[in-house]
Image (tube, coloured by chain):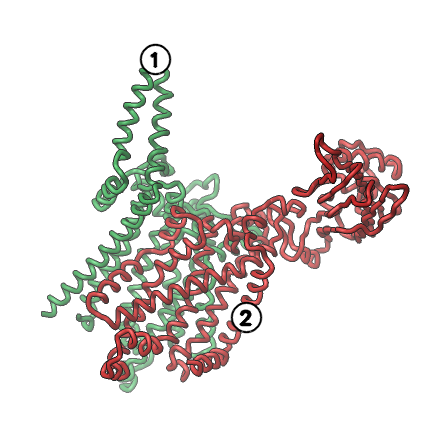
Chain colours: A green, B red
Amino acid sequence: MVALGTARVLAVRGATLFGVLIASLLLVIVVLGATGVSDRMMGAIVNEQVRELRQSLAQTIRDPDELERVVLAEREQLVEFYGLDNPWYFRLPDMVWRVLNLDLGSARTLKSFAGSTRVSDIVLERLPNTIILVTTAMGISAVMGLYIGVKLATRVGSRLDRGMSYISAASYALPTWWVGILFILVLSFQLHIFPFGGIVSAPAPTGLLNRTLDIIWHASLPVATLVLASVGSWAYVVRTMVLNTAQEDFVMVARAKGLPENIIMRRHIIRVAAPPIVTSLVLGLTASFGGAILTETVFNWPGMGRLYFDAIMSLDENVVVALTFMFTVLYVGARFILEVLYILLDPRVRY
Amino acid sequence: MGERTRSTWKELLSTGSGKAGTAFLAVLIIISIGVVVTYPADFGIKYWSNPVLWADNPRVAPPSWTNLFSSFKHAETVVFEATEPAEKVSEFGVIRAGYSFDLNFNADESPTFTSLIVQDISYRERPPVLTLSIERPDGKKIEMYRLIVSGPRPGEEAPFSRYSETPFRVQLSGEMNVAAAVSDFLKKEIGVSISSQDLLVRGVDIAVFGKPSGDEGFDVLQGSYKIKVDALLYDEADSIGLVKFVVGGSVYGLMGTDTLGRDLSIGLLFGFPVALFIGLVTSSVTTVIGTFLGIVSGYMGGKTDTTIQRASDILANIPLLPILIFLAFIIGQNLFVIMLILIAFSWPGLTILIRSMVLQIRSGQLVESTVALGASRFRIMFKHIFPQTAPFVFAQMIFFTPAAILAEAALSFLGLGDPSLPTWGQILERGFSDGGVYVGYWWWVLPPGILIVITAMTFVLLALGLEPVVNPRLKRA
């Protein structure tokens, strides 16, 4: 009975999360299609190709009528190839179907730094950059947040605790990107300690060690920005979780038994407060692969966030759809795995 | 309800953060009202984005008060304006209207530019003639510039109106005739010979506001200058609407200027009502929708509940910023569109929370007894359940306000702001994309950010102050 109920709950959750995925993709393609953006963009691509074709054919075909006929035939072929002869609601579902089959396709205007137009190539180039920046920052803030949060929970109401809760509230009102600008202005422009942006110096230093150091030097400001923006809320979340658990009866029992405070903290409190913290950790980790659009913009960092932004700005619908798919799949996948883990790991969670 | 509002206020004002938040909010509202009353409705398009209006200002000049902190005194921008002449003498049918401006100049550099603006001239018989001269502290006088208003065109009838639509504007520093006049002055009065070509290259102002110092260089001549514009009119009814003289400095006003010479203080002030509008309207609409659907979902149960919950689940899980950027770029950079998108993706979070509250309230005795009394479902939901959620809903609204303000600022910073309504985010974006960070235009990128933070912080403080109201258990701690 219990197992059946659990399976049902997981199925509903799974269906909802799949709904999230489909809704995200539908939203993107309906907006692209219904506003005519897709048609305009594809039309421009066809026109550009026809123009190039005419120029090259004009070298070999002298008769203008003949040339016109060949170009027109070629144009019709292109229109058919791109599916422009059908309205968008016939053309775009194909794209969703293809993406759902894990074929990310190729970009229309964007290129990887190496020159490839395949979306997977572009992503593979950008993903490490984002991991260096956003995932590192996320890891640092999580570790710091855990440490500070547990510390605060042991001295609730202290000056440190109250100060930290104000700081974490203040960080909610502090736009990350503006903190980045502040850092550049003070540490790069005024004090010349850090570079203004980018990922490596030009020319890039040779040797693995020098290169690594150079990247670390470039990453320090943006990483510091992201950490500063999120460490407050991490500490606060951990503190709340730990506090909530600390008020439970079994903790009081442990105290009554006369167990030392550090054992109570380690064995009774943190172990129980861990699942929600792990949830934040996993979700934060998956979200970090999506990059940080604003911070990457401020620091001119060629990561995933910037890629998504550039794809929108150049209306490269294949890239936009592929990235939307990737980000949502990551998120939805992480959510589902957590859901399963919850049920498997915590015997109290039964539906 | 009135009693309750009063006690909420009391509670709010009893905490430090509540007091600070209320004080900040009062200041924000007062400034906003002042701006709404005094600014024209089409400020964004007609004034802020109109480069002609800012042509008389120095470009990217830091605020004037920076002089207090530096040993080198930068020239301040001074604008003189007169609609009526200081003196008017009539002799032999000719009227001499004299305009006179006193400039006390004691900067360590000469002005960066000087310009003369004349507007709205009307005449009947002969075109008026205007002469600009400057009397220097050393008693010498430079005849700088002469403007002969253009004569009647064939077929035009008196009175002839000139420069009424677009004012006549001459940047004296780059004017050939001015350079020739100053070169002449230098030769006759000072005994220095510099060709007018050379003067044009080096800037006329260093000579007009300077005294020679070896090697053909100039030192700044500090002291009081008298700038005189004399107009000769040939009819009693002839008139000049406005005479304006600008001494361009390298510092400007309270907040400095941007690359178009726009006075940043004017744009920043305009940002107050816009930010409050975005924050409050977005958060209140979001709260109304979220609360309504939450109560309906929680109380009605069944299919309604499932539908609303699935929809909120899906919407709440779609990553907001990428979708916001995508939609804002494709659908259009219009403030209302941006606000609508924010609302569309923000209500689900609240709906989920309210629903769980309603589930608890529904099983309480109050609701049970009203059902027994035969109250309608609508009445129960909004007369009996809603009031119990009200403090929480209100706190959520306050808490969501900075999120909306920050989201708009982020979009504007990416260049997706509504161009017809200048916001702090847009000013910051201009400063950043014009390289303000790399060359250190701090007065351009810091103040808008600080204002965003202060405004967002105001609501965070209010939310903190409201916490004991919403969560009475916290009071004991």
What amino acid is found at the position of numbered circle 2 in the picture? Ala
Check the image and name the residue furthest to the bottom. Answer: A256
* The image quarter in which residue A116 lies: top left
Residue A63's label in the rendered image is 1
**Which residue is disc 2 drawn over?**
B26
Q: Is residue B303 visible?
A: yes
Residue at horizontal 34%, vertical 65%? B289
* The image quarter in which residue B349 lies: bottom left
What amino acid is found at the position of numbered circle 1 in the picture? Asp
Q: Nearer the viewer, residue B154 or B419?
A: B154
Residue at horizontal 33%, vertical 77%? B383
Quarter of the image with the C terminus of chain A is bottom left
Determine whether, in the image, residue A46 is placed left or right of residue B454: left
Do marks 2 and 1 share a subunit? no
Q: For the residue labelled by badge 2, is the local secondary structure a helix, a strand or a loop?
A: helix
Residue at horizontal 27%, vertical 81%? B367
* The image quarter in which residue B240 lies: top right
Query: In the rendering, at what x and y percent does residue A213 appear?
Result: 44, 48
Residue B419's label in the rendered image is none
Please report, as a chain letter, where disc 1 is located: A
Q: For the residue labelled by badge 1, is the local secondary structure a helix, a strand or a loop?
A: loop
Query: In the rendering, at what x and y percent does residue B423 appear?
Result: 52, 55
